[in-house]
Image (tube, grey):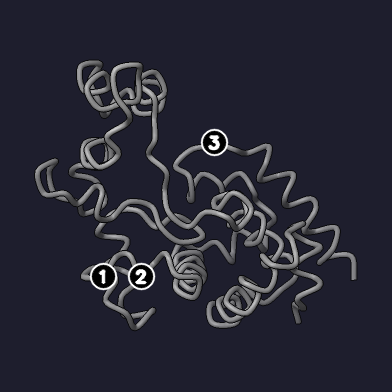
Amino acid sequence: MLTPSDFQRATGVSNAVRDAWFPHIAASMAAFGITTQLRQAHFLAQIGHESAGFTKVEEGLNYSETALLATFKRRITPQQAKAYGRNEAHPANQKMIANIVYANRNGNGDVSSGDGYRYRGRGLIQITGKANYTALVKQLGVDIVAYPDRLAGNMLAAMSAGAWWKNNGLNELADSDDVIRITRIINGGINGLDDRKSRLTKAKGILCST
């Protein structure tokens, strides 16, 4: 059974972060079958990366004009990046950025629907898109489609991460110790792979050595 001390040592978080998150993460693990040491190590490594060390539960969209083009070059035009990205002329228009880059993806409507910003990444695993929010309503018992901001609360941030993890077969991939495939499913690529691997090594050193 994962203890608060195990969680803290496996993730390197402060006492305050441990106290704020451990009960919710432990409940999520129990609810969604993240019950072996290897599964727990992979889960903690991935949500630790996605949440910047359990400090962020809502996607930041404060992109510069240059970063917007580098990150979303297939979803945004240079003209849009100049108009909405952060530059010397103005701050980033985060709402418009989300509405453009997430339009017509993962169940979202077009730019004018506002779905991109409404269903931006939230929770410890950054649930993104109306379809992904909708898929979790029954499991969470909360209408996060109507009230998406609720995913930013600690309990639902943790529970949504566990539910999404289970629904996407990540328990089984954790059993095979496949950090790259897990990362691709969560991220759509391998962004942050070195940090994810580093966190996994730390977590396995604590959880899988007993």
Tag 3–tag 2 contact (CB < 8 Å): no
Tag 1–tag 3 contact (CB < 8 Å): no
Q: Quadrant of residue 61?
A: top left
The residue at the far left in this view is 112
Q: Secondary structure at mark 1?
A: loop
In the image, what residue type sits under mark 1?
Tyr
Numbered mark located on residue 150 in the image? 2
How many residues crowd around disc 3 within 10 Å: few (fewer than 14), some, or many (20 or more)?
few
Image-based side of 149 in relation to 205, left or right: left
In the image, what residue type sits under mark 2?
Arg
Q: State the residue position of label 3.
A: 191
Residue 16 image point, x, y percent? 69, 67
Q: Residue at x 26, y 29 (%)?
A: 75
Q: Secondary structure at mark 2?
A: helix
Q: Residue at x 55, y 76 (%)?
A: 28
Q: Quadrant of residue 71?
A: top left
Q: State the residue position of label 1.
A: 147
How many residues crowd around disc 1 within 10 Å: few (fewer than 14), some, or many (20 or more)?
few
